[in-house]
Amino acid sequence: MILQEAYRFACNTLENIYDTREAANIANMVMEHITGLNRMDRLLHNQTTLTALQQQQLHEYTSLLCRHTPVQYVLQQAWFYNIPFFVNKHVLIPRPETEELVNWIIQDEKNKPGLAPTRILDIGTGSGCIAVSLKKNLPAAEIHALDVSSGALEVARKNAEQQEVLIHFHETDILQPEKASYLPAFDIIVSNPPYIPLKDKAEMHANVLEHEPFLALFVNDNNPLLFYHTIANFAKSHLKRNGALYLELYETMGRAATGLFLSAGFQQILLKKDMQGKDRMLKVERI
């Protein structure tokens, strides 16, 4: 099988479950991963024959994809903030909305007067995409990251090692604050916690429901702001004066989350829309 045939095979197979455009995008990702050649190089060498191993990988990957396995899990790689991250079933696939949250922190830090080092905590680090991206772009910062999942922390540690950055990892359940009481005070606390109500589960795609970790996605309908309430209380003792919380939100919870932090005694609160115009990010400052 030559490159041209392999690409067409991948497209035709994936069009059984994806529209033509998405099938082509995924096929390109698969072909680049298998061959190490970008799209232009493959066009220039489209008569090159795949090795037996490459053909085997092509069939394995397309088979998994046709069972709705996300391409990032199939290839075990997801790009976030221009950095390749290892991902598997233990962690969420990084999303563009979270990149916007990370960019907000980086820009705020770069515009801050003075050169004092910043201590940052990432709550629910998952793949480590937030913590690692912050360390890569704010190398003077001291970064801590916690997660309740040992499997997620194994992935996060691998990503920190691959990107050659020092992150202080903690296996801790933030919903049991006494277990995190040993942590120091932070200038910044950031989190993309579970926030999707169970009642909205029916609206989720199969590739998310059947493959991404349930624990990192959903909260009970009777307490959808559980993690924000916990983080607000944690911040009272672990966020420095003039420090800030940066949080990702469910698009329908902006007003409720704002009210929660006001009730908790925080006064400087900024609700920010993402590129799609949805209320998805919150910055809470401690005066």
Image (cartoon, rainbow, N blue to C red):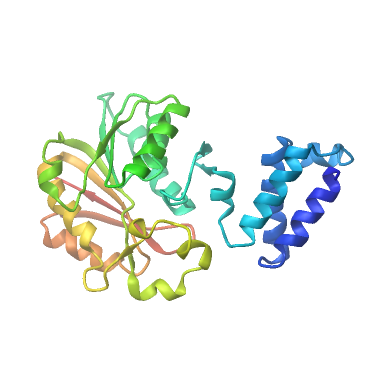
- Which residue is pictured at 72% across the width and 56% down the height? 24
Q: Position of residue 161 (x, y in %)?
A: 43, 27
Q: Position of residue 202 (x, y in %)?
A: 43, 75
- Which residue is pictured at 61% across the width and 56% down the height? 64
Q: Is residue 158 left or right of residue 198?
A: right
**In front here: 255 or 183?**
183
* Relative to 241, residue 117 above or below: above
Q: Is residue 50 left or right of residue 213?
A: right
Q: Position of residue 130 (x, y in %)?
A: 38, 41
- Which residue is pictured at 19% across the width and 65% down the height? 259
* Relative to 149, residue 24 above or below: below
Q: Quadrant of the C terminus?
A: top left
Quadrant of the rendered image containing residue 127: top left
How many numbered marks have been drawn onto this rendered protein structure? 0
Q: Quadrant of the N terminus?
A: top right
**In front here: 211 or 245?**
211
Q: State whether residue 38 appears in this view.
A: no
**In front here: 277 or 65?**
65
Q: Is residue 206 left or right of residue 145?
A: right
**In front here: 249 or 156?**
156
Q: State whether residue 66 appears in this view.
A: yes
Quadrant of the rendered image containing residue 43: top right
Q: Position of residue 89 (x, y in %)?
A: 45, 50
